[in-house]
Structure formats: structure tokens, C-alpha cells
Image: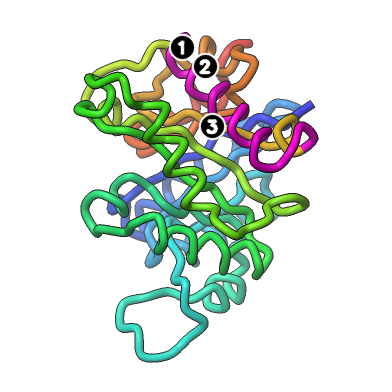
């Protein structure tokens, strides 16, 4: 059985003092069997978060990683810097990196390749915007993202997780129904089967992200092809995030 994941992406929110306070509350949660909880603070909050989460069941990851080993890349964070801190989880290809910072599939692929080679658990994000969905091209778009973000990468035996995040449902208040989310996650799993075979398709975990909240998490987590959630706004406050961690089956 694939382990479920509840991941909180704090984006550019929460300084290190706030991170300590939030995690001091979250580490008291009883995490369900066969579940994992990961938080992704800003880089400056990672050391504080790691300190509080030490010896707890909550893992601390990074929101981004450089495709470069080291050198004259001002503002970048290398895999060695993260590994030395004790970080083993990283997000690549989030829609905000793709849309705002113009990271194309080639850059995302290079980041994913570097992170996988260095032993990280990689969450690779995929998802379409409203205009693409309005033209009923979401499957074509996501398949192209997936193929090109993993081009020439053999993911078999690697710690890769996929996250379907429809851009039109991130922070907009618009809701992707459980049925639609399941349909897209099933399509992503089918594409993995075409690319890497049935064994990999049955093992890979696929998350859903986009306006996840207490009211819809049980429905999402009950779906056959949704193995967890990548949460934004609801992960910034302990009260709302604990409701997601403690969702009713």
C-alpha cells in the first residue's frame, strides 16, 4: 500500500520565529499509521524548523533547489547546502516557479535530475491554467509537462513523487472536485505506466494540491489514485493544518 503524504508548502511566509511556534504545536499531533507529514518552510526558516521537528514524525523539506553543484550562482541554494542541514525532501517545478520565475521544463528537469542523483525525495509539480482547461487541453498539457520534466531521467528506484496542482485552483478559492482531481491523477499514473511500466505506475505516489481544506480532504484522500495532498494556505496556521493531519477517514 502506498503511504499517504500530507505536505505543507509555506511559500514566502513564516519567518524563523513563527516557524518554531507553528512546529511546536504541530509536533504534538498523532500522525496516522501509513501517513507522512512534511513541511516546506522558506530557506531562512529551515534550521529553526529542523531543530523543533527533531525526533518527531514531521519531516522538513525545501521549496526549491539549484540544478548547479556550486559556484557563481548568486541567490541559489545547492543540494550540498540542504543535505548538510539534514534536508532530504525538495519541491521542484511548482507552478509559481514555472509561471513567475519562468522555469521551463528543461530547467525543472535539470533540477529534478540533480536532486534525484543526490538522493533527495523529490516532489515534482504539474498542472494547467484556466485557459488550457477551458480549451479541454489539460491532459495534453500535463502529459507534455511530465514527459519533458523527466526527459532522459530513469525514475525507477528513485524517490520521486508527483503533485498535480491545477493553477486555476491554487489560492483562487475555485475548487477542483474530487472527481476531477482523481481523473487527472489517474491520467498521470497511466502516463507513468506508458513511460516506465506498470510496476513503477503502481508504486509512484501522486499528490493533489489546490485549495485543500478540512472540508474536502477526506474526499480527496479516499480516491484510488490520490496518495496525499500538497497544501498551501491551510498549512500556515496550526489550527487549520492540524485538521488536515487529523482528517477523518
Q: Position of residue 16 (x, y in %)?
A: 37, 60
- Closest to the observer: 6 or 243? 6
Looking at the rendered structure, the secondary structure element under dot 3 is strand
Q: Magenta stretch containing residue 190, yes or no?
A: yes
Q: Position of residue 194 (x, y in %)?
A: 65, 34
For label 3, the crowd category at 10 Å Cα-Cα, with few meaning under 14, some 14 to 19 and many 20 or more, is many
Q: Name which quarter of the figure residue 216 lies in.
A: top left
Identified at 54% across, 73% down, the residue is 79
As displayed, is residue 178 above or below residue 227?
above
> Disc 2 and disc 3: Cα gap in Å?
10 Å
The coloring applied to the image is rainbow
Q: Which residue is mark 3?
A: 207
Identified at 39% across, 11% down, the residue is 177
Identified at 42% across, 31% down, the residue is 209
Q: Which residue is mark 1?
A: 178
Q: Quadrant of the C terminus?
A: top right
First to last magenta residue range:
178-199
Q: Which dot, 1 or 2, sits closer to the camera?
A: 2
Q: Is residue 198 left or right of residue 27?
A: right
Q: Which residue is mark 2?
A: 182
Tell me which numbered mark, 2 or 3, is placed earlier along the sequence. Answer: 2
Tell me which numbered mark, 3 or 1, is placed earlier along the sequence. Answer: 1
As displayed, is residue 79 above or below residue 55?
below
For label 2, the crowd category at 10 Å Cα-Cα, with few meaning under 14, some 14 to 19 and many 20 or more, is many
Looking at the rendered structure, the secondary structure element under dot 1 is helix
Q: Are marks 2 and 3 in contact (CB under 8 Å)?
A: no
> Disc 3 and disc 1: Cα gap in Å?
12 Å
Q: Quadrant of the N terminus?
A: top right
Amino acid at each position: 500500500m502506498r503511504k499517504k503524504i500530507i505536505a505543507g508548502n509555506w511559500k514566502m511566509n513564516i519567518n524563523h520565529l513563527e516557524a518554531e511556534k507553528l512546529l511546536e504545536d504541530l509536533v504534538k499531533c498523532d500522525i496516522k499509521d501509513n501517513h507522512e507529514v512534511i513541511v516546506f518552510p522558506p530557506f531562512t526558516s529551515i534550521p529553526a524548523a529542523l531543530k523543533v521537528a527533531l525526533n518527531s514524525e514531521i519531516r522538513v523539506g525545501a521549496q526549491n533547489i539549484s540544478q548547479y553543484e556550486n559556484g557563481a550562482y548568486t541567490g541559489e541554494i545547492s543540494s550540498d547546502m540542504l543535505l548538510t542541514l539534514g534536508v532530504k525532501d525538495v519541491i521542484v517545478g511548482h507552478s509559481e516557479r514555472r509561471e513567475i520565475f519562468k522555469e521551463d521544463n528543461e530547467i525543472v528537469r535539470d533540477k529534478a535530475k540533480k536532486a534525484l542523483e543526490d538522493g533527495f525525495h523529490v516532489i515534482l509539480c504539474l498542472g494547467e491554467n484556466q485557459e488550457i482547461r477551458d480549451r479541454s487541453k489539460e491532459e495534453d498539457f500535463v502529459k507534455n509537462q511530465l514527459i519533458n520534466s523527466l526527459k532522459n531521467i530513469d525514475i525507477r528506484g528513485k524517490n520521486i513523487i508527483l503533485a498535480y496542482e491545477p493553477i486555476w485552483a491554487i489560492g483562487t478559492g475555485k475548487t477542483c472536485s474530487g472527481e476531477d482531481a482523481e481523473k487527472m491523477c489517474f491520467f498521470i499514473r497511466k502516463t507513468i505506466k506508458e513511460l516506465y511500466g506498470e510496476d513503477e505506475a503502481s508504486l509512484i505516489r501522486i499528490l493533489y494540491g489546490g485549495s485543500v481544506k478540512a472540508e474536502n480532504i477526506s474526499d480527496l484522500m479516499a480516491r484510488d489514485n490520490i496518495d496525499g495532498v500538497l497544501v498551501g494556505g491551510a498549512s500556515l496556521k496550526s489550527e487549520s493544518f492540524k485538521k488536515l493531519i487529523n482528517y477523518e477517514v
